[in-house]
Image: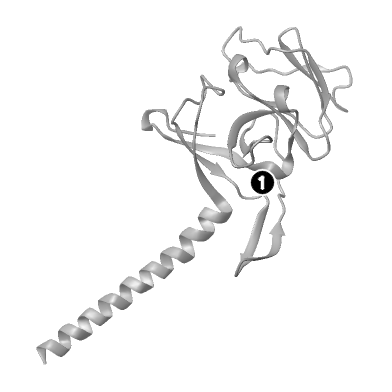
Amino acid sequence: MIEEKEQESMKDFIIEVVKMFFLALIIIVPVRMFLFQPFIVRGASMEPNFSEKQYLIINEFGYKNTPINVLGKNLVTIKPRKDLEQGEIIVFRAPIDQKQYYIKRVVGLPGDTVEIDNGVVMIYNEQNPEGRVIDENSYLPEGRKTNGTIKVVVGENEYYVLGDNRAASSDSRTFGPIQKDDVIGKVLLRAWPLGNMEIF
């Protein structure tokens, strides 16, 4: 009698564990696939705002192409719905090696003309036909200049991106505007180190 109760108790316990496992899968997998993704900073291209080995959480929802696969077949791809804004920090697939990811700041939006000259970045668009110098005082150290002499039109499905550490960043000055489809998402949270935790 006691053995039967113990067996039933063990059976109930196993059923509860299996239920919890599948419940966790139902909750965690969609969150990981469609909403948020961890990202570890590599290199110095975004210093002093983001440093090597900092742990970030990226908001993917509405920003990246999301293929829906069933049994290895791509049934449909959810296209990005949200537009980025100037100054936002994003993670995207590297244009040269799609297996790598870069973190940069959005400077030029679709339709903008970006001009870099004499250390400053100017934007020309419908709202600013004469051009305007971008105010980067909130995230660049005082006196930091942007190297290069460039003038480029940003395409309809493109963004022009720059690293905050302008002297040590491989960015759109090197590889040109990035494709909207290559954007994974924008930085939502710096989670580590705890002393530098910040929501963006």
The reply, left or right, for residue 104 in relation to residue 195 is right
Q: What number of labels is visible?
A: 1
Q: Nearer the viewer, residue 148 or 33?
A: 148
Query: Residue 21, image x and y in percent?
Result: 38, 67
Dot 1 alpha-carbon crowd within 10 angstroms: few under 14, some 14 to 19, many 20 or more: many
For the point 71% across and 9% down, the residue is: 119
The quadrant of the image that shows the C terminus is top right
- Which residue, given by chain and number where applicable, does mark 1 sit on? 63
Query: Residue 84, image x and y in percent?
Result: 70, 38
Determine the image quadrant of residue 16. bottom left
Q: What residue type is labelled 1?
A: Tyr
For the point 82% across and 23% down, the residue is: 152
Query: Residue 33, image x and y in percent?
Result: 55, 55
Helix, strand or loop status at disc 1: loop
Residue most extreme to the front: 97
Up/down of 134 relative to 156, above or below = above
The quadrant of the image that shows the N terminus is bottom left
Query: Residue 172, image x and y in percent?
Result: 71, 26
Up/down of 138 relative to 94, above or below = above
